[in-house]
Amino acid sequence: MDDADFPDPTDWIQTPVPGLQTLETSLRCQVCKELFTAPKVTSCGHTFCSLCIRRCLSASSKCPTCMKPDEEPRLRDNIVLSELVNSFNAIRKSLLDTLVAKEEARKQAEEEEAKRKAESKPKAEKRSSYDLDDDEIMEDAEPIRRGKRRRQDTTTSRPTKETEPVRRSTRTSSRRTNSRMGSSQTPVVLDSEDDDDEFQLTDDSSEDDFRSATRGKRKHPPRVPDPRTENSDLVDCPVCYQLKDPSKIEAHVNRCIEGNGSPPPTPRRANGASPAGTPLKRQPVSFSNVSKSQHRAPYTAEEKLKLRLPKGNASLAKEADIRKKLRDIGIRCDVKGKDNKQVLWTRLQEWTNIWNANLDSDNPKIKQVLIKELEAYERHQLAQKPSVVQDKDFGREAWNNAHKPGFELLIANAKKTSIQRKENGIATEAKDQPPDPATGENMDSNGIDSPKSVEA
Amino acid sequence: MFAQKRLGKIHKSLPPGISIASASDFSNWKMDIQVLDTNPLYANKIYRLNFKFSGSYPIEAPEVTFIKEDDREIPMHPHIYSNGVICLDLLGTNWSPVQNVESVCMSIQSMLTSNTKNERPPGDDTFVRSGYRSPRNINFVYDDNNV
């Protein structure tokens, strides 16, 4: 089915609960229009996928929605949203299928009823039975909605007991869902509410199941705590990337610039791996205890894999450094001839975006996969870039056509003068004056000629 | 990369007056737009927009121009040149990645709706004669906030 390939909020319009469209729209990133992957909140409160917002901010340091200035280090995780998206995604298909089936059944019943009405009035008894059937179906469509709402209720006020009729219809609906869908998450929860005795208990356990299911999705090893989130008051030193108290930052920056960069309290570089003079590497900060003179051990290889990369500064970075950095990561440079600094820098930025976003993700991928992604992204950018050559060709052609008579006149003139010059012989050439306009015209005719030859 | 998603999103539920004329590939779309109120300048006319997407869409704005075809002309508007180039800040400096084809069409629609002047931008002749290259290479000065 088409819809299955392109899940879209508009899928819900055809269901009995069109309001789900807005719900799903809110669960989608405004940039890539997909369900959020590792959602991040900007300082102005808008949320985007980690990779999307990182790319946007690298392009222009503004929030895509409200255009307020923002920068990457100020992004924060939106944990509850990420859980919401995960659980919504898990139930989406079954919910949609159920609702669509309901709607179809309702329409069918309506049609049949209309047919019957048109057929005859004498069969009043039979009709009433159909009416009843229809009612039941109508009622059926409702409970799903109730069921959903109720599921939400159970998380907030657990011990709410339902009245008999509602529960009954829920059971039918959940049974139907089950028979139609096989097992899925929604019906499980609904089912658990079937028996009064078990209600409390099963509900709790299924709640836990549900939660652990969502947890299970984010089963990546415990994240290295980001010192930024832990000490949100601290600010980056623009020179050495250490986190500093805002009140002391000025003095610190001054010291940094003067050259005796490392202030006594924090060890400047506990990590031997980062060579001196690379401004791109953020100075490692000890996680547990940011301040004080505690020396931390160098990062292990495993820890290094979980460090966010700093963005760096294009004008400070040297081409050789960028090249070395890329090579160290394992990214190829100079595949098609020599890449210039701009290309290399863009590549490193994109790598930083992909790498950092991957760390935010629930299911981090390994480096090799990320490198493949980076290459694919670059290929895609090149492929779809309205290539410069094409654009120029197009412009040239239009230009050529529009000015053909003028060009032809100039060419004819140029030929005439060159013939004249030949006829005039060496005498005129010896004088320095005439050749000047002549060569000028020659150049002109060359300039005009070249596009023509392209055209031909 | 974004392209497939892009195509899927727009197929259903377009706002009134906007329809897809062709979207055969992911780098070039044609959209038909129509002004729905009774603005005498544009009543009962359909215009065709050409969208050109670069690889970095939606980070980078698409190139949007009106195109002339047998039954489609370039609308009269003080910000639309007779070769179809549109001067709209949304498509240049004020582009934001949250925009999409639909929202761009709607902006242009409302730009037409609110217009009352039956004229071309000043310097239209010279602009058009200077050779159409690509809106990307043009630096517009967005000076008019009224239209």
Image (tube, grey):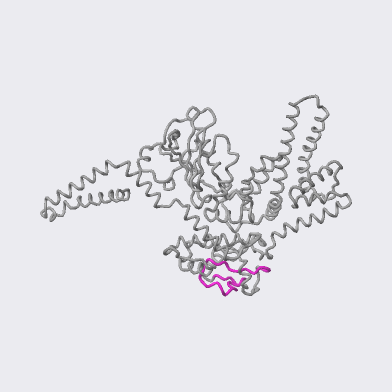
The mark total stands at: 0
Up-down: is A308 above or below B100? below
Does residue A438 appear anywhere in the picture? yes
- Indicate left or right for B37 with A146 as reference: left
- Residue A149, horizontal then vertical, whole percent: 77, 45
Q: Quadrant of residue A220?
A: bottom right
- Considering depth in this image, is A380 or B60 the residue closer to the camera? A380
- Residue A184, horizontal then vertical, whole percent: 74, 52
Identify which residue is drawn at 20% across, 50% down. Answer: A437
- Residue A168, horizontal then vertical, whole percent: 84, 43
Does residue B92 appear anywhere in the picture? no
Residue A281: in magenta span: yes
- Indicate left or right for A421 with A74 as reference: left
- Residue A123, horizontal then vertical, whole percent: 81, 27
Up-down: is B16 above or below B100? above
- Indicate left or right for A220 with B120 as reference: right
- Considering depth in this image, is A275 or A95 the residue closer to the camera? A95
Looking at this rendering, what residue extends furthest in the right direction? A197
- Considering depth in this image, is A178 or A193 the residue closer to the camera? A178
- Indicate left or right for A192 with A225 as reference: right
Residue A28: in magenta span: no
Identify which residue is drawn at 79% across, 51% down. Answer: A189
In the rendered structure, which segment of residues is drawn in magenta? A261-289
Magenta stretch, main secondary structure class? loop
